[in-house]
Image (cartoon, rainbow, N blue to C red):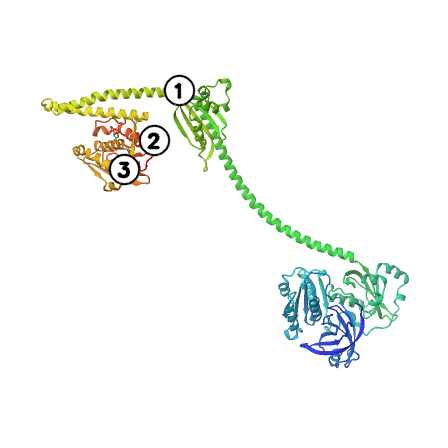
Amino acid sequence: MTKQSYTLKILNSRKVALNTTEITFERGKGILPFCAGQYVKVTLPKLLYADPKGESRDFSIVSSPNTIDTLVVTFRGSESGYKRTLLELPIGTAVSVDGPYGVFTLPSDTGRSLVLLAGGIGITPCLSMLSYAKEENLPYDITLLYANTNPKRAAYLSELDALSAESKHLIVKKRFGDITRIFIEESTKDIESPLWYVVGPPAMVEASRDLLLGLGVIEANLFVEEMSGYSGEVHLTSASRLKGSVTSSLSTPEMLSATILEVLDNSALVAVTDVEGDIIFVNNKFVEISQYSQDELMGQNHRMLKSGYHPQSFYGDLWKTISMGKVWNGEIKNRAKDGSFYWVDTYISPVFNNDGEITAYAAVRFPITEKKEAEEKVALEAKRFQQVAEDVHKKNEELEKIRKATLNILEDLDEEKKAVENRVLDRTKQLEQEKEKLMQVTQNMKGGAILLDEKRNVIFTNANIWDMLGATVEKINDTDALDLLFNKFKDTDIKKYFQRCIHGETFHVPEIESGERVYEIFFHYLEDHVRAERKHFGYFILIFDITDVKLLERSKSELVAVASHQLRTPLTAMRGNVEMLIDESYGKLSSDQHELLDDIEISTIRLIGMVNDMLDITKLEAGNLEMTPEKLDIGKIIRSIVEDLKDYAHKHAFTITHDPVAESVPSVYGDRVRVRQIFQNLIDNAIKYSRHPGVLTISYHSRKGVVEIELKDNGIGIPKNEQSKLFGRFYRASNSAKSASSGSGLGLYIVKSIVEQLNGSIRFESVENVGTTFYITLPTEEKSITST
Ligand code: ADP
């Protein structure tokens, strides 16, 4: 875009805010092409009022480059001769417009978001940019932060509202008052890494720039433009201050020796300006680095190279130094024509005439962009490194916390582990001891033992097993034990028994034959009961040869059966005869004879009872006491027993109380004769071992699956220390003889055996000299009668 001078007519002038005027020039199609954001210099034909600053001023363009017919500028009014003249010029007046100037323009190749920060009249280039961005549908979201001292001074509020209403890519945030950090932060918190454009009065630009840098915005993302029309109506390049003192057109090459120039030409950017700062000489290097042609540079102010990086005070110092006749040296960041930046180490020296007056300034600039970029990079890296270091530090602190917490947990775990190890050691020791014990016991016992682990591997056998299983010593191998066992009992259910054991059952087979011999085999499913959750760890099989025991038992039973039968027949005959004698069927008896015969009768009855008991025991133990289970009305059976024993009870002044609820008692299952035998025995005992006046209370309790019959007497009771032996064979308590001299001590043994065979139970509670209560349960449902 080349800069030219155009003559444009004033088309219109209007107030857009307090002390703010907009002037529209007739542009004419395509005349004065510019980029949105640029400014023009307007030179008036003549001043109506004197103005020391002359007849030209810079104005930002507010219209869009697409508005081809007109060009619009806006400015704040002032008392200056120039502004007063401009406001009074009639419509149609032609003025000279130069431009375009400035690099404060929209980026063309980025998809990044933009934040425009406009202060006061700084809205003008922004409005141009926003209109253009909308018209061209440019690929970025724009947020405009627009600050004014008050709404009256704020131009274009309604235009902005209209624009943002029409475009979803534009957000407008207004603020009346100073621009604050909070305002910037809150308005832009959701925008990721935008490009920042700051434009407005110099003080506002400088303050905003500092705020943004403080918020971490980097220079490369920050573009600033200070507006003219402030601080004495000059564009804030200090050079303007010296306007008017331009002396002459100097021939610069004459001032510098040709040799030096040649050297410098290759290494430095050399420029000479007049006292106003307008360029009057540049060397090739200057042209090369700045990218402007010599023509473009000549007569221009250095301002056009400003990058916006340095604060205004920086240039102020520069000018102060050189205008005082001293050499200034410093590093400056400038902007090349294509918008890229370059750094130069700059020496500016005043040039004096013979009178010692400053007539020009000579500047020699050495390019240091690479060095600066490296420095910036280092600074950036350092900042990043610091951030990383801080993060690492934070992470380290967190890690340290976690490490400590972990250590604590580990310590706890360690203790726990030790405790577990100790428990395991104890347990192992215990198991070792148990194994040792088992070995000792099994080695010394008559039976054969096989121990298998949970995988059914034989892990231990005792010496006896091999004889028993018929293995020769040479062939001994633990793993054979199970096969030998199965083989020995191959005609039996041995494998089925072993399967039962594998399925978790512990039981014994009381008799199992192999050839001529009889064995008893115990199968144990081994579990570790110590731990909460049981662990299966193997099987234990114990085999006893019980051939001899069985033979002995058989002969004993046979003996008892034969003896009992042999005894019962004569005893029954004896009893009949004695009864006949007592009945005086064979003649009158004296009282002595009566007494004698009564004693004989009692003894005979007792003997018959004992013989019957012994026969029962023989049958019970041989497992051939016959039982025919049937549904029984237990209340009725007991009532009939009570009825039968009425006379006997009466004789002993004994009262029997029968529970009134007996009627509703459910039926039980049992063998009628044997159930009767149970209660006959118990009621008989209650009467036999009673105290005067004796009472027996019979009651019934129905529970799940059983009926419990309670027989509570107030008799002599059973001494505490003898209670455990009560159900033993031939046991009679030490206090029993006082109440009943007769008694075999077999009754309760038989009762318990029968009850258990009927799947019932019996227990008692007794206090000596207070009474005894027997509790018998019988099943209400049919179950197979247990056989031993
Ligand atoms: P026996 O009555 O023939 O001695 P049992 O086996 O019936 O034999 O009873 C064993 C013993 O239990 C009795 O000798 C007696 O000492 C004690 N006994 C049984 N029933 C009672 C009871 N109701 N009150 C006190 N003692 C009893």
Residue nearer the viewer, 664 or 404: 664
Q: Helix, strand, or loop for circle 3?
A: strand
Vertical arrangement, residue 474 with respect to residue 309, above or below: above
Q: Which residue is mark 3?
A: 709
Inter-mark Cα distance, 1 to 3: 44 Å
Tell me if label 3 and label 2 are in contact, CB under 8 Å: no
Is any atom of residue 713 visible in this view?
A: no
- Other-residue count near label 3 (Cα within 10 Å), few / some / many at <14 / 14–19 / ≥20: many
Q: Helix, strand, or loop for circle 2?
A: loop
Q: Is residue 788 left or right of residue 168?
A: left
Q: Which mark is residue 404?
A: none
Q: Which residue is mark 2?
A: 786
Vertical arrangement, residue 263 with respect to residue 447, above or below: below
Q: Amino acid at mark 1?
A: Arg
Q: Amino acid at mark 3?
A: Ile
Residue nearer the viewer, 366 or 156: 156
Q: Helix, strand, or loop for circle 1?
A: strand
Is any atom of residue 210 visible in this view?
A: yes
Q: Which residue is mark 1?
A: 517
Q: Is residue 539 left or right of residue 654?
A: right
Residue at screen point 23% across, 32% down: 680
Q: Amino acid at mark 2?
A: Thr
Vertical arrangement, residue 203 with respect to residue 506, above or below: below
Q: Say whether disc 1 or disc 3 marks the residue closer to the N-terminus.
A: 1
- Other-residue count near label 2 (Cα within 10 Å), few / some / many at <14 / 14–19 / ≥20: few
If the image is split into quadrants, where does the C terminus sit? top left
Residue 696 x, y percent position in the rendering: 22, 37
Q: Quadrant of residue 510?
A: top left
Q: Ligand 1: does it lie within 8 Å of the C-beta at label 1?
A: no
Q: Say whether disc 3 or disc 2 marks the residue closer to the N-terminus.
A: 3
